[in-house]
Image (cartoon, rainbow, N blue to C red):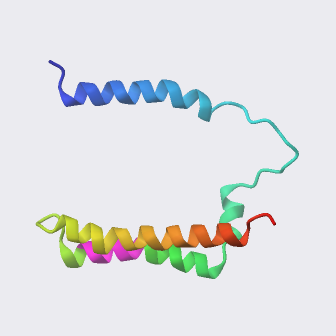
């Protein structure tokens, strides 16, 4: 009987065979100029930069305060991770509504 490690390795190999050719496929140039990650980071507003930093700091601070590795993992997920996910989801939805074609 195969162990969990062998099963995980097989899943990793299969997903690599399926996903990697799609990732490294040459892109068709459609007239749009592709911007690099560095250019996108330079164009970020101060509000978004602060939000990204806070969304990284808040779960770490919650983890240090709640110590989920000893007990209370569910409480940490509800108070440390879920608020970040909800806030970023709301920002994503609101920006989609603002930028929707009319």
Quarter location, residue 30 = top right
Q: Looking at the rendering, in which quadrant would you find the C terminus?
A: bottom right
Report the side of 63 relative to 94 (left or right): left
Q: Position of residue 79 (x, y in %)?
A: 29, 75
* Residue 61 forms part of the magenta stretch: yes
Residue 46 screen position, x and y as percent: 63, 81
| Residue that lies at the very extreme toward the front in this rendered image | 102
Answer whether residue 13 is magenta in the image: no
Q: Residue at coordinates 34% horizontally, 24% vertically from top-left?
A: 10
Q: Which residue is found at the position 17% from the left and 26% from the top? A: 3
From the viewer's perspective, is residue 20 above or below residue 64? above
Q: Is residue 94 left or right of residue 89?
A: right
Q: Which residues are magenta?
A: 56-63
- How many callouts does the rendering have? 0
Where 24 sits versus 48, above or below?
above
Residue 13 placement: quadrant:
top left
Residue found at the very far right of the displayed protein: 31
* Residue 93, x across and y down, in percent: 59, 68
Taking 19 as reference, is 39 left or right?
right
Q: Could you say which quadrant of the image residue 61 lies in?
A: bottom left
Q: Main secondary structure of the magenta part?
A: helix
| Spot occupied by residue 18 in the image (x, y as percentages of width and height) | 51, 26
Quadrant that contains the N terminus? top left
Q: Residue at x 15, y 69 (%)?
A: 72
* Residue lying farthest to the left in this orientation: 70
Query: In the rendered view, would you say 2 is above or below 81?
Result: above
**Residue shown at 11%/66% (left/top)?**
70
């Amino acid at each position: 009987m195969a162990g969990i490690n062998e099963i995980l390795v097989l899943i990793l190999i299969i997903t690599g065979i399926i996903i990697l050719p799609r990732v490294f496929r040459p892109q068709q140039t459609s007239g749009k100029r592709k911007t690099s990650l560095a250019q996108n980071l330079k164009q970020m507003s101060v509000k978004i930069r602060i939000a990204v930093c806070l969304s990284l700091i808040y779960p770490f601070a919650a983890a240090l305060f709640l110590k989920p590795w000893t007990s209370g993992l569910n409480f940490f997920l509800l108070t440390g991770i879920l608020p970040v996910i909800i806030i970023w989801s709301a920002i994503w939805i609101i920006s989609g509504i603002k930028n929707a074609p009319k």
